[in-house]
Amino acid sequence: MERGYMSAKKFKSGIISFSMCLIILSLASINAQAVEKQLIPLGGTVGISLSSEGVVVVGIPDKMRDEGDESPAKAAGIRAGDIIKEIDSKKIESKEDVKEVTKSLDGSPVSIEVLRNKQPHKLTLTPYKCEDGTFELGVWMRDGIAGIGTMTFYDPQTGLFGALGHSISDSESGVIVPLKDGIIAKASVQDVIKGKPGVPGQLSGDFDFSDVLGKVTCNAGCGIFGILEQADLAKGKEPIPIAAADEIRTGPAGILANVSGSDIREYKIEISRVYTGAEAADRNMMITVTDPALIEKTGGIVQGMSGSPIIQDGKLVGAITHVLINDPARGFAVSVEKMLNAALEGVDRKAAA
């Protein structure tokens, strides 16, 4: 399966999968079990930019250049997905920090602290000396990511928003990127690559980070969350009740999706299966697109549509998360209850820090 998330690199898109959690909100009023809670379903695309807490190792070459020497990082035991926190006792927060540290290396072994599965590890690395006399660590790394995704809901009482329905993870390593900070900005869909069996489609969009709508403060397994500072996306829209997970049923439903410009429309779907117990760990529903207009436009679910809100019986029940590669008309979805619980867990973790 593929994540239903499409990226746009400063104005034109490619595919990026991402993920992160911190939230500075007073959300005591949010109770995912309370059916009287009301949220505004959105469905519009936004540009998303995140920077990571530390530098994520996205890959390690087996050999250095053409000489055949083993990568120092590989020899030291560094793995893809590790998060570099310190080099030679110097705090690392960005790729620029890594570059600055490597300028002072003389070839002597250095200590490196990484986070692996949230646990710190101390390693020793001997830098590789290049022909020009400079030194390298032998890692490919990333300290941020940008793309577009779909907004799921907005809470007019607290300013909270939810989007994507899944975490933002590094596309190479699959690690959930630890969030340092993030923003969302206005975006519009410029093109659609139609999904076909075996070839997932995608949205292509433009966005401009000079027009910031809000801050991303939490990147969890079932969505990204934050505060919407400009509520333009919710203008003229009314809140509707949310459904508890046990209220979701198989049968007709609708999604709000943005697959052209800034136009948000409702399309028909079928909730074809509801998952419970262990099967509901990372998904709550299987859905099938039944709307002829959406199938004609996109082939079904495409990358970039993850986060599209699902409405059934007048209630917000969840959001699209993934598309099935071999059947683009079908995919998975997460419940809004689970998304709200993830937002609250973000608050609890921040309060405990």
Image (cartoon, rainbow, N blue to C red):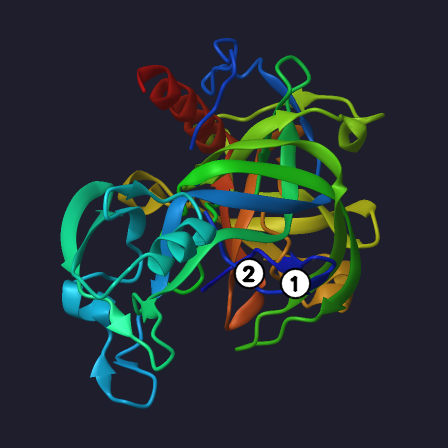
Q: Distance between the residues labelled 2 and 1?
A: 7 Å
Residue drawn at the location 80% of the way across and 45% of the way down: 264
Residue drawn at the location 39% of the way across and 50% of the way down: 55
Q: Is residue 233 above or below residue 344?
A: below
Position of residue 69 measured from the top left corner of the image (x, y, whole percent): 22, 83
Residue drawn at the location 16% of the way across and 64% of the way down: 76
Q: In this view, does 29 lie above or below 21?
A: above
Q: In this view, does 182 lie above or below 289?
A: above
Name which residue type carries label 1: Gly
Query: Which residue corresponds to mark 2?
Result: 330
Name which residue type carries label 2: Arg
Quadrant assignment for the C terminus: top left
Whether residue 310 is visible, yes or no, is no
Whether residue 59 is visible, yes or no, is yes
Residue 258: image tag:
none
Q: Is residue 99 above or below residue 179?
A: below
Q: How crowded is the residue under tag 2: few (<14 C-alpha within 10 Å), some, or many (20+)?
A: many
Horizontally, is 108 left or right of 228 in the view? left
Viewer-side residue, 170 vs 1: 170
Viewer-side residue, 16 vs 165: 16
Position of residue 171 measured from the top left corner of the image (x, y, whole percent): 45, 62
Quadrant assignment for the N terminus: bottom left
Viewer-side residue, 72 vs 106: 106
Residue 300: image tag:
1
Dot placed on the residue nearer the N-terminal end, 2 or 1: 1
Circles 2 and 1, Cβ within 8 Å, touching? The answer is yes
Q: Is mark 1 on a helix, strand or loop?
A: loop
